[in-house]
Image (cartoon, rainbow, N blue to C red):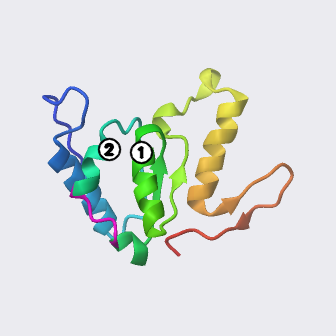
């Protein structure tokens, strides 16, 4: 479940609700990645409310940048890998998408799907945290 509390001008809900939403995704073995759509402002406020230790036994990709970096740092201290990467809210499609953005978007998709890409390189499976 995702919360959209319109009374919160900058967040998708209260800190407690957002932390509970993220914790549910961390704890759910069916979730293989948590990708921040855009932003992450205020994510540092969630850290004291989260138990990240389940990710040691059942790792999954945590993806984002900017304020999500604080979450990456906490995960790094636990020895859990994450992706400091572009977010879907930054994807541009059609005429608005630049060649550089296409490369970035495809690199994220490849990382999430466990594929290695390169110029002229044959796609090969790489280690992903949930396997």
Classify 16 as above or below 87: below
Q: Residue 123 in the image: x percent, y percent?
A: 76, 61
Secondary structure under the numbered disc 2 in the rendered image: helix
Q: What residue does disc 1 label?
A: 68
Q: Residue at x 50, y 58 (%)?
A: 82
Seen in the picture, residue 23 relative to 125 is either above or below; the reply is: above
Q: Residue furthest front?
A: 77
- Quickly name the residue at label 2: 43
- How many angstroms separate mark 1 from mark 2 (CA)? 6 Å
Tag 1–tag 2 contact (CB < 8 Å): yes
Res. 107 in view = yes
Residue 114's quadrant in the figure? bottom right
Q: Is residue 5 left or right of residue 131?
A: left
Q: Is residue 76 above or below residue 98?
A: below
Q: Residue at x 63, y 27 (%)?
A: 97
Please give left or right for residue 66 compared with residue 106 in the image: left
The residue range painted magenta reads: 49-53
Which quarter of the figure has residue 67? top left
């Amino acid at each position: 479940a995702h919360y959209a509390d319109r009374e919160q001008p900058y967040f998708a809900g209260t800190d407690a609700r957002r932390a509970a939403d993220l914790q549910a995704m961390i704890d759910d073995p069916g979730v293989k990645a948590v990708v921040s759509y855009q932003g992450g402002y205020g994510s540092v406020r969630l850290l004291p409310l989260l138990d990240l230790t389940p990710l040691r036994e059942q790792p999954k990709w945590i993806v984002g940048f900017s304020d999500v970096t604080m979450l990456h740092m906490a995960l790094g201290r636990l020895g859990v890998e994450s992706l400091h990467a572009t977010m879907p809210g930054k994807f541009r499609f059609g005429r608005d998408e630049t060649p550089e953005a296409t490369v970035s978007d495809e690199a994220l998709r490849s990382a999430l799907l466990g594929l290695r890409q390169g110029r002229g390189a044959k796609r090969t499976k790489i280690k992903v945290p949930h396997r």
